[in-house]
Amino acid sequence: MARPKTYIIKLSDDERAALQKTIRSKKTCKTVLKRCQILLELDEEQGTGLTHAQIAHTYAVCPATITNIVPSYAKNGITDIIRYNISPIPVPLSVKWKDVPKHALSKWPAGLSRRIVDIILLRQELAAWESDRNEHTAYIEWQFTADNARTKLASLYPKFGVIVKNN
């Protein structure tokens, strides 16, 4: 016997129309598109009646995505479904990722496990980390050298032959 549903999704005509409009829009990103399609599938009145696992398989998403969409709709309606929100912490518009050096994004220092939103604070943290590494004469131990690459990746490089034309 199946467990009783905690949340029952019954979309109004206006909500259904808003979801379909979002699906038809060419500006809708894939994440929001799938959320809208999933919510339409879960509708008790006009949905397909598929299980969460079947819907997850149909739309190639993790089953956790389905279980996250349902309470989100129950709590806030379709506003959270239609709006694409990567993180609950907004990133200021002044932060441009091209201004952040590539080495700053590769590996964070051990003590730096928090999210830094401000570019000025990021630069200060990186400067402190860099000076600490320089004081302790930290060095990079290259595990994969050019000689190893030539040996191990030789099969990936094309082989060129010499073509001789006879006159």
Image (tube, rainbow, N blue to C red):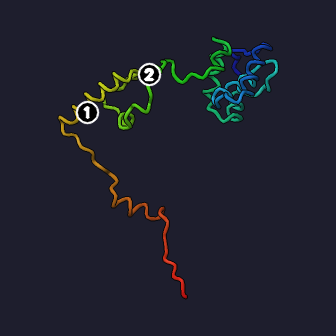
Give how far across and how far down residue 71 sits, in percent: 63, 16
Marks 2 and 1 in Cβ contact (< 8 Å): no
Q: Is residue 63 above or below residue 75?
A: below
Give how far across and how far down residue 23 sits, in percent: 73, 27
- Direction from residue 44 to residue 81 in the image, left or right: left
Which amino acid, mark 1?
Answer: Glu
Instruction: Please tell me which residue is depicted at 38% across the width and 64% down the height of the picture.
Output: 151
Does residue 1 show up? Answer: no
* Depth check, front residue: 109 or 46: 109
- Direction from residue 25 to residue 102 in the image, left or right: left
Give how far across and how far down residue 124 sits, in percent: 29, 24
**SS of the residue under disc 2:** loop
Which image quadrant is residue 32 in?
top right
Instruction: Please tell me which residue is depicted at 47% across the width and 64% down the height of the picture.
Output: 155
Q: CA distance from mark 2 to mark 1?
A: 24 Å
Instruction: Please tell me which residue is depicted at 48% across the width and 61% down the height of the picture.
Output: 156
Instruction: Please tell me which residue is depicted at 80% across the width and 26% down the height of the picture.
Output: 48
**Rendered image: mark on residue 94:** 2
Location of mark 1 (residue): 130
Q: Is residue 130 above or below residue 70?
A: below
* Depth check, front residue: 112 or 14: 14
Q: What is the count of numbered marks?
A: 2
Of marks 2 and 1, the one in the foreground: 2
